[in-house]
Amino acid sequence: MAEISRIVLATGNHGKLRDFRFLLRDTGIELSLPIDHGVDLDVEETGTTFQANALLKARAHAELIDLPILADDSGLVVSALDGRPGVYSARYAGEPCDDQANNLKVIDEVQGLADRSAAFVAVLALVLPGGREIVAEGRCEGRIVDDERGTNGFGYDAIFFRDDLGCTFGQATDEQKNARSHRAAAVADLLAQLRALELVV
């Protein structure tokens, strides 16, 4: 199989596209969105795990676009909330998706709790033309703070505090966040697998 030079990121989220372009900047891989190929697909995330949802999205787009398809399912896992919001992270406060409403709901639910530990988890599913599937995972530890801090990033970044940074991901630069993020760890895992298969340099 030839080296991968182009990947379609199965999302409409431009924040994710920006993160992935940063993380893959040294690979020479060109990233595009489904809409760039005339596809506007909203895949229902019916899986109960991040991996199941990532594979659902990647497989659905692979049926319509004959290029490598990369899907990401990620979310916030809060220890004291029994792992919530988990796979429901994007719509935790209800429809439509609203980052601030989600943040405020988590802040409210951890009020008075001593354990604020949390993790971002990301699972990547890459479906190649021909049907081969590669799954990668990354995790990033932190804790939940009492208020939104910073406007960089998206999702739960503004309430996810990293002690090594002394700030939330919402206050961190792209470089600081992407050096430590769950998505960075997942991309590193994916690239290691692709290099072992000689699909990237």
Image (cartoon, rainbow, N blue to C red):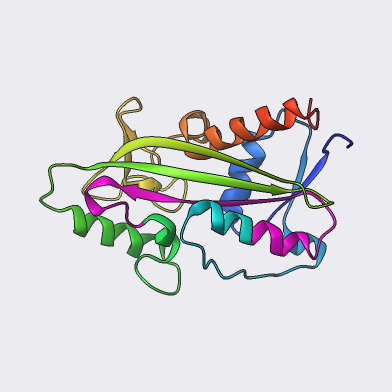
Report the residue that reaches farthest toward the left: 112
Q: Is residue 87 above or below residue 18?
A: below
On the rendered structure, is 91 left or right of 107?
A: right
Q: Position of residue 69 (x, y in %)?
A: 73, 52
Q: Is residue 79 magenta?
A: yes
Asked whether 92 or 18 is in front, the reply is: 92
**In magenta segment, residue 56:** no
Residue shown at 26% from the left, 46% from the top: 79
Find the residue positioned furthest to the bottom.
Answer: 95
The location of residue 128, given as percent across then percent down, is: 78, 48
Residue 59 found in image quarter: bottom right
Whether residue 102 sits left or right of residue 75 in the image: it is left
Query: Where residue 55 appears, x then y in whole percent?
Result: 62, 55
Query: For the point 60% across and 45% down, which residue is it?
Result: 124
Seen at 68% across and 70% down, the residue is 41
**Farthest residue, direction right:** 2
Q: Work out whether residue 61 can be spotted.
A: yes
Q: Quadrant of residue 96?
A: bottom left
Q: Can residue 11 be seen here?
A: no
Above or below residue 92? Residue 133 is: above
**Residue 140 vs residue 196, the one in the foreground:** 196
The quadrant in which the C terminus is found is top right
- Where residue 3 appears, as percent x and y from the top left, is 85, 34
Which portion, as a residue range, is magenta?
57-85
Which of the image's four quarters has the N terminus? top right
| Residue 198 location, quadrant | top right
